[in-house]
Image (cartoon, grey):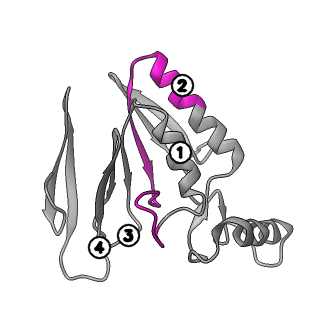
Amino acid sequence: LLGLKKTWYSEIVNDWRFIYLDGNDISFSASCEGSAEYAEVEKYYQAHGAPSPRWNGALADEQLHWLENELQISTRSQQKVIIFCHFAVYPFSEFCLWNAPYIVSIIDKYTCVKAWFNGHEHDGNYHQRNHCHYLSFEGMVDTDHSSFAFVSLKDESIEIRGIGRELSR
């Protein structure tokens, strides 16, 4: 419906590169039960995902290679990067992509990555690891209170102005 050639992509705004990832690249929800693709997801899940919940997913090799290439380009171009994905990757928990440790090992190599923003973890979460801030925004489900935020990008900081349940940082 959106006319996307791929379900992952990037865009550049000033000196920032925004990278949008598809955490359902390998997932049960993106394939039909009984199909060959679903059987491949089951194999992947048994090898990499279990015991993480089956409603999570993973980035396939093609997307992982693309991500690393985007980070190499960003480094050469002296761009700062924010990565967006529905799923968390850090700290490692039941809310993370099945291949989160591998993804974090990629991010650890590139100081251009300033933040990973995600949803999925409805109670929210925040951790910093090395140069990257990992922020799970609070969900607007399972609650009577709203939750959203305004993000301001500064030369030396990222400011989050939380509304409702979302904290300001």
Name the amino acid, label 2: Gln
Q: Position of residue 143 (x, y in %)?
A: 24, 82
Viewer can see residue 1: no
The segment highlighted magenta reads: 69-95
Asked whether 83 falls inside the magenta stretch, the response is: yes
Q: Is residue 31 above or below residue 33?
A: above
Q: Tell me what residue is drawn at x 59 percent, y 44 percent.
A: 4
Foreground tag (2 vs 1): 1
Say what secondary structure mark 2 lies in.
Answer: helix
Q: Nearer the viewer, mark 1 or mark 3?
A: 1
**Residue 71 drawn at (x, y percent):** 51, 30
Q: Amino acid at mark 4?
A: Asp
Would residue 89 be found to the left or right of residue 32 on screen?
A: left
CA–CA distance in space, label 4 to label 3: 6 Å
Query: Could you give the CA–CA distance between mark 1 and mark 3, rounded to whole angstroms?
Result: 21 Å
When the figure is inspected, residue 120 is found, relative to residue 83, above or below; the finding is: below
Q: Is residue 32 visible?
A: yes
* Spot occupied by residue 120 in the image (x, y as percentages of width and height): 41, 67
* Residue wearing tag 3: 121
Q: Position of residue 69 (x, y in %)?
A: 59, 29
Q: Which mark is residue 72?
A: 2
Residue 24 placement, left or right of 130 = right
**2 or 3: tag closer to the N-terminus:** 2
**Amino acid on which disc 1 is placed:** Ser
Please tell me whether mark 1 sits on a helix, a strand or a loop: helix
**In the rendered image, which residue does mark 4 sit on?**
123
Question: Mark 4 or mark 1: which is in front?
Answer: 1
Question: Which residue matches tag 1?
Answer: 105
Mark 4 near mark 1, Cβ–Cβ under 8 Å?
no
**Callout 2–callout 3 Cβ contact below 8 Å:** no
Image marks 2 and 4: residues in contact by CB distance under 8 Å: no
Q: Residues within 10 Å of mark 3 (few under 14, many from 20)?
A: some
